[in-house]
Image: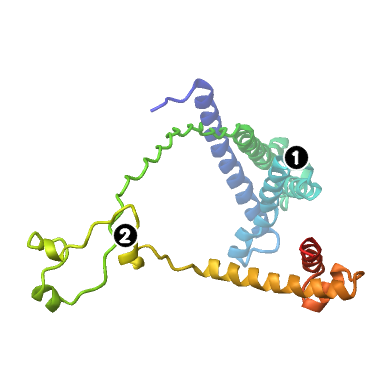
Amino acid sequence: MKLPTPSQVLAIGAGLVIIALTGAAFWLSYAHLAEVALAHGLGGARERAWAWPATLDLFIVAGELLMLRAALTKQVDGWAIALTAVGSVGSIVLNVAGVTGTRNPADVPVLDYVVAAVPPTAALLAFGALMQQIHQALARVESRPEPEAVEAELVPLAVVPALAAEPLPQVPALPVLGPWVPVAELLAKTAGTSPDLRASESPEPFRADGEGAEEHPELFSVPPTDDEQHDEVEATAFERQVADARSWLTDEPELTGTAIGKKLGKSDAYGRRVRRAALATA
């Protein structure tokens, strides 16, 4: 636990003394004003007589609080000063004036006036000193620098090298299976690569001179693909169109490729291509 500094101890002690002084001064001033109210018009209403001094003393409290708020905002509040002045001056004047009572003012000792004036004056000064202490404490709190935000250090992420992709293992080509044979036929007749295969039933080996190709033509004939068939159809159509264009050019030598494309229902570029081919084979 951190012990308070000597300066803080003195400030706390002064604050306690000022609070005690303010309370005592306000009580003496308040009680004397209540007696003045009882002696001048409120003798039959004791409760109202004790409430009447608040109409002056609370002006002091309200004015001092408003001045404190204005000081914190670094402004000047004229209403706060006016309220404090009215409450303080009114309290002092009425406390002093109430000393005379029904006596002749010349017969009243001067110390009676002094005794009556001290409590409201002390209450005004003590309360002002208390507000000053509060103002200084709040000013220190506001001027205290705020802790700076600590920026978190960015930790660089570890770069993990990418693993090289290993090549896929080479899978040997699978043999092409022959036509499907029912299970019953396999059981009735030994076929395939069974060790019971007889030599007479084994297929003849392929010979380089082409004899095997004659006996088994289906092993070497590869059916054309769709793209090859399409190319053959287009080549045949193109040759036919070239022949038509050749006959047209025979009748009309000045016929252009654009005109040939229109007759064929094709583009201009296609018509020029057909015309060049027709002229080349003419």
Q: Is residue 68 left or right of residue 262?
A: left
Which is more toward the observer, 110 or 133? 133
Which is more toward the observer, 17 or 279? 279
Q: Is residue 209 left or right of residue 33?
A: left
Q: Which residue is mark 2?
A: 211
* Residue 258 locus on image (x, y percent): 86, 70
| Circle 2: residue type | Glu
Which mark is first along the chain, 2 or 1?
1
* Residue 145 locus on image (x, y percent): 61, 31
Residue at disc 2, secondary structure: helix
Which is more toward the observer, 72 or 194? 194
| Circle 1: residue type | Lys
Q: Which part of the image, by quadrant, shows the C terminus? A: bottom right
Tell me how far mark 1 sits from mark 2, CA to CA. 119 Å
Residue at disc 1, secondary structure: loop
The residue located at (67%, 47%) in the rendering is 65
Q: Which residue is mark 1?
A: 74
The residue located at (45%, 33%) in the rendering is 159
The 10 Å Cα crowd at callout 2, few under 14, some 14 to 19, many 20 or more, is few
